[in-house]
Amino acid sequence: MSLFPFAMYQVLGRDPDSVFVKEMGRDVPRCEIFKALVMDPLEAVIEVDWRDFFPFFSWVPNSVEAKINAVHIKRKAIVSALIDEQRQLLSKGKPLNCYLDILLTEATHLTEHQLLMITWEPIIESSDTTMITIEWAMYEIAKNPVVQERLFQELNEVSGSKLVLEDDLPKLKYLTALVKETLRTYPPVSLIPPRHVDEDVQLGGFDVKKGWQVIINVYGINHNKETWKEPELWNPDRVLNDQSLDLGLQDYRAIPFGAGKRLCAGISQAMCIISMTIAHLVQHFEWRLLPEEQSTNVVDTVFLTTHRLYPLKAMAMPRIRSRLLSDKL
Ligand code: HEM
């Protein structure tokens, strides 16, 4: 399951099968675009450069640098090609219907590099984080039949035999609590990539020197034992009536979307897609873990965003056959 096509529609108003990249002298197919814009950068960003730990050896060449440069060069070539293609479409009269169209027509003060980066950013940001959260939530829902039943009852009470609509979301308090608790327990971005320190500052009682790099441990904050009782436990009830838990807007007990001026730009969209998807999955099906999933409480992850090492295996049993046949999304 990937939201890459959705991300492309949002940014480009279309999901191209391929794009001609002149630096590569060929058409690059969609699967390669996905790899170059999403998977390769996710891998590159967690490469460890041992020279960071021994700054006096920073002059020693390291293959990590070459690898990261290669990822950057390919990403730049592909995003530039997508932007050029969009410019051509606009010049032929394509109506404005997406994020890049607005950037190209209204944000004309941007440099080419800025344009490239802010075109790419929502593609990588929205392709996997939202999907990862849904997968973790479905894992817990399938593991906890009592929670699942309570959620199903709430969905029934609010929308009856109809499928939940976006307008219903404010009324679905338990669903919202469940999504928040999933983002607390399994933050998809568990470490915020390094921030360069521009000047000497004091942070949480520590002296942080100019030139250092700081990595924010979101997982550590969300699992802080001084804030949360049994932090490893996934329990929607703990946040059900906690109105102040806003996931980093003003309350910093759990910050899955970061915090401050670089706070995630897609919170509302993410919360809406996650909640709607879970609601529909639970309205249509009853979920149970497969035996191999039940046998362990530890689930390994890969990449910067907490992809499960092995995708979730669950059984989905249709709840009401007639509902599947009669209702429309
Ligand atoms: C569950 C889903 C998501 C999570 C957990 C998440 C998390 C984050 C985090 C941790 C950051 C970095 C904040 C920082 O650097 O301090 C971020 C930035 C960002 N996110 Fe999300 N994100 C999610 C979904 C989305 C979606 C759907 C979009 C859609 C457009 C999006 C767009 C962005 C953008 C543009 C930034 C950069 C903001 C900036 O640098 O000013 N995110 N996100």
Image (spheres, helix red, strand yellow):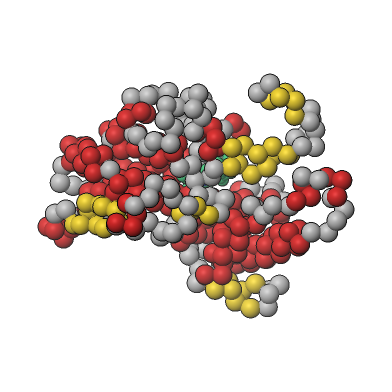
**Of 49 and 153, the residue lying toward us:** 49
Name the quadrant of the N terminus: bottom left
The answer to whether residue 10 is above or below residue 200 is below
Residue at point 59% right, 55% down? 42
Q: Is residue 184 something that shows in the picture?
A: yes
Residue 238 occupies which quadrant of the picture?
top left
At a point 50% along the width and 23% down the height, the residue shown is: 226
Nearer to the camera, 80 or 54: 54
Residue at the (18%, 57%) spot, across then down:
318
Q: Ligand 1, what quadrant?
A: top right
Q: Furthest residue to the front?
A: 295
The image position of residue 149, as x and y in percent, is: 21, 41
Q: Position of residue 41 (x, y in %)?
A: 62, 57
Picture quadrant where residue 206 is located: top right
Residue at 54% in and 32% down:
221
- Is 149 positioned to the left or the right of 170 in the image? left
- Give x and y (percent) for residue 185: 44, 38
State whether residue 35 is above or below residue 273. below
Q: Residue 87: in sight, yes or no?
A: no
* Image: 167 above or below 2: above
Point out residue 55 in the picture as x, y percentages from the top left corner.
83, 45
